[in-house]
Amino acid sequence: MRPIFLFTDYGVTGPYVGQVKAALLARGFAGPVIDLMADAPAFDPKASAYLLAALLPRMPADAVGLCVVDPGVGGDRAALVVEADGRLLVGPDNGLFELAARRATILGLWRIVWQPDELSATFHGRDLFAPVAADLAQDRRPQPPWCSPTDRIDRGDWPNDWAVTIYVDGFGNVMTGLRGEAVAGDDVLVVNGRRLTAARTFSDLPPGQPFWYVNSVGLVELAVNGGRADQCLGIAGGAVVELQKNQDAPDAASA
């Protein structure tokens, strides 16, 4: 039985994650469930796509991802199964899997055509994606025809590295869509008029000092030693980050 991980924007309060887990159990799934993320960028498949792609390599190699950031639920967007280097991802075809698919060495894509007997117009995570994920995790398929091969909708205008803030964690650290390999250690990042230089870790700088660093999942992150970068810099998700190749530019403390 494969493990399942949940990646959603449902939030940690309310009944939604619990109902999804109940639907997995109802489908006979009794394996491990990893609560990877319940606060993915809400209503934002694009920002969530960069975050999911960064987190995915640290999931078990045979995992099934139940991934739902789905503002178009009940509309004409398709439902997908994506195989990315052995991991199976189940969710909406709205760009959420774009970066994971683009970075995969081995890729397979299928459109889900099966539907359950009862399908809420607004909760496909519970009624459609959870049963499919549970079946895939148990190496079985819904009754045929359950899916058909499909081509990926290529969002070629989405860059490989996105110089935009995509997620603010509970400590106020701000992740961007830039991977560490897209920047150099002497680069300066400018956000909301503030110029940030790089540090290896928080304690390399005095308390209250803002900086950028490459975080534990390989994304460029904005942070403050002992403080909240979102408040210090006056930013949230969606802020543009300017990359400057100038090691002699002033840092945030002197800006």
Image (cartoon, grey):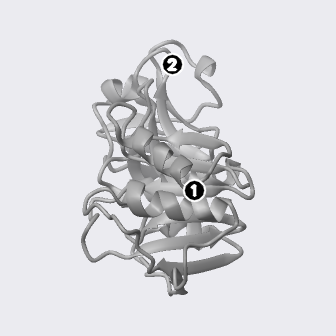
Among the two numbered marks 1 and 2 on one chain, the one whose residue lies closer to the N terminus: 1
Relative vertical location of residue 26 with respect to residue 36 in this rendering, above or below = below
Q: Are marks 1 and 2 in contact (CB under 8 Å)?
A: no
Disc 2 designates what residue? 225
Pick the front one: 98 or 70: 70
Image quarter in which the N terminus is found: bottom right
Q: Position of residue 149 (x, y in %)?
A: 55, 87
Please tell me whether mark 2 sits on a helix, a strand or a loop.
loop
Specify the amino acid type for callout 1.
Gly
Disc 1 designates what residue? 65
Specify the amino acid type for callout 2.
Asn
Apparent side of residue 139 relative to residue 190 in the rendered image (left or right): right
Q: Position of residue 22 (x, y in %)?
A: 48, 44
Apparent side of residue 92 relative to residue 135 in the rendered image (left or right): left
One can see residue 178 in this view = no
One can see residue 111 in this view = yes
Q: Position of residue 143 (x, y in %)?
A: 55, 77
Q: Position of residue 101 (x, y in %)?
A: 57, 71
